[in-house]
Amino acid sequence: MREQWFKDAFIYQIYPRSFKDSNGDGIGDIRGIIEKLDYLKDLGITAVWLSPCYKSPNDDNGYDISDYRDIMDEFGTLADWKEMVAGMHERGIKLIMDLVVNHSSDEHKWFVESKKSKDNPYRDYYFWKKGRGKDGKKPPNNWMSRFGGTAWSYDEATGEHYLHLFTKKQPDLNWDNPKVREEVGGIVKYWLDLGVDGFRCDVITYISKVPGLPNGKLAGDNMFTHGPNIHAYLHELYTEVLSKYDCMTVGEAAGVTVEQAILYTGEEREELSTVFQFEHVDANSFLQIVPRKVDLKRTKKVFSKWQNGLHGKGWNSLYLENHDQPRSVSRYITDNPGTDDFLRKQSAKMLATAIYFQQGTPYVYQGQEIGMTNIVFNSEADHVDVLSKTVFALVKKYAPFLKGYAMKALAIRSRDNARTPMQWNAGKNAGFSDGEPWYRVNENFAYINTEESKNDPDSVLNFYKKLIAIRKNSEIVRNGSYKELFEESKDLYVYLREDGGKKLLIINNFKNKEIPFTIPESGERSLILGNYKDVDGEKEMNIILKPYESRVYLFEQ
Ligand code: NOJ
């Protein structure tokens, strides 16, 4: 029987490069995380998902790993890491590491060997293939990199192309080779033996490719997403390694449907504990980088589909932000153009209420708990993420007339928005670093920072603390049924959770305006959480909801 602690966890994601720098080199590091463990404990979170901290040339900020068993020099040493884990465990915080094994770095020794010759023992650790055309220099198939452009790079020395679904410095590992799967199992075991409590499995739905790597539809996605052996490979990893430890896994699963998620997370299937689905974030974007108008009805539909679809059959992950997504207050709230700080706080609290009373394991991304926002991009040079740079390069080469649109779209969608340094205080570099930060600090750090938040009883941070504490002890939130109410509303997201005769009514006003509302449930009720001090008609049936107001009522009979 699989351990279920992940169902009660509240997970905090750390993007180490931007979290806290302890040595003044401008790059966040492990000793910086150690300095902030009490902050995390005080917040009430019970686990940390740490984005990659392994050795890496940082083409994609650590999502390109050159040594899976050691720590990136900029982040510290394995001894620092061990001290960090011990410090987490002492405080009752579990550690979930990022497992990036769809691809490695091209600087990993496996790839360096693989490139040497066609008969190198490591050749089959990756996908090498002859190209098309007379000179064989055309890509072998139509697969596109997730970051744009072909997914193949030609290697002059051996006259073949290798596959990379991300940058050319991230060659895809060939999971059809049993040796590769054994290596992955060994890596997983290595970290579990060092005390980690789980893994977030990067782009795990891409690990099985259709044999022969044929052309696919559009960008080839149907030939490498949820491929023919994916379930067998995940089940193997589970039985061979994961099942022997008290650990959890969460698979990053862009494009996954409810039906597929049940296959990945159904307990009896013994594959993953849970997955990150993308439908609610895709509800206002196309292909990750193209913005789409926020439509609350569309987003609610997605929430409800996943709540109802996985109830009793799988397990949801609840998130609005991570290192790949823009900041949620900037993204979902478009009618407060960032000028009113009171309303920024109210909307950040409302968004938290809207998502975290759903069923599933909650994730909060560093800075979300203080309502950090997107940044302002003034020029192309402000963009440092490899995805944005790739887009700009492609636009320059193939469609220079799209430059203006690319600037606008990326300002809203760029992953850089989420990667600015954490705002700890109003001092130099927001308290992130004594040196020159690797990436710019958001100008608003003077008033959006953890110090300010600690001192303000009405801060987003203090609201998160309350919410986390309520959620921790709530059977209804963990197990209760879910029912969406007022589905037709374009302004309100209202839902009911119910378990053992108790009900929670969660009301969220997504708009910057007052909205009259009639409480749809009768009976004695108590307000257990809300984001306004003055609550209109706390006990009445007809109330007026204030801009971005949230209320959570408990009905106990
Ligand atoms: C998903 C990660 O979250 C993202 O940051 C990365 O660029 C890709 N996978 C490739 O590893």
Image (tube, grey):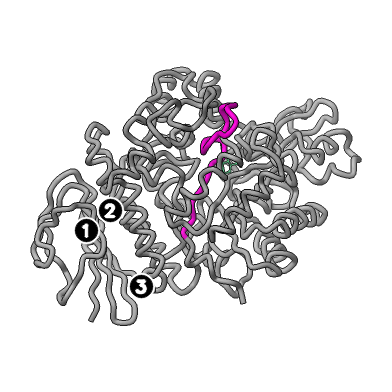
Residue 500 picture location, percent across and down: 33, 81
Cα–Cα gap, marks 3 and 2: 25 Å
Horizontally, residue 315 falls left or right of residue 128, namely left
Answer whether residue 391 is visible to the viewer in this image: no
Magenta part, dominant SS: loop
SS at badge 2 = helix
| Image-quadrant location for residue 2 | bottom right
Return the residue at label 1. 488
Horizontally, residue 292 falls left or right of residue 525, namely right
Indicate the quadrant of ligand 1 in the picture: top right
Q: Is the Cβ of the residue at disc 2 closer than 8 Å to that at disc 1?
A: yes
Cα–Cα gap, marks 2 and 1: 7 Å
Horizontally, residue 314 falls left or right of residue 247, namely left
Q: Which is nearer the eye, 307 or 148?
A: 307
Residue type for callout 1:
Glu
SS at badge 3 = helix
> Quick one: label 2, few (<14), some, or many (20+) residues within 10 Å?
some
Residue type for callout 2:
Lys
Residue 520 picture location, percent across and down: 16, 69
> Quick one: label 1, few (<14), some, or many (20+) residues within 10 Å?
few
Return the residue at label 2. 297
Q: In this view, does 47 lie above or below 322?
A: below
Residue type for callout 3:
Ile
Instruction: Name which of mark 1 and mark 3 comes first in the sequence.
Output: 3
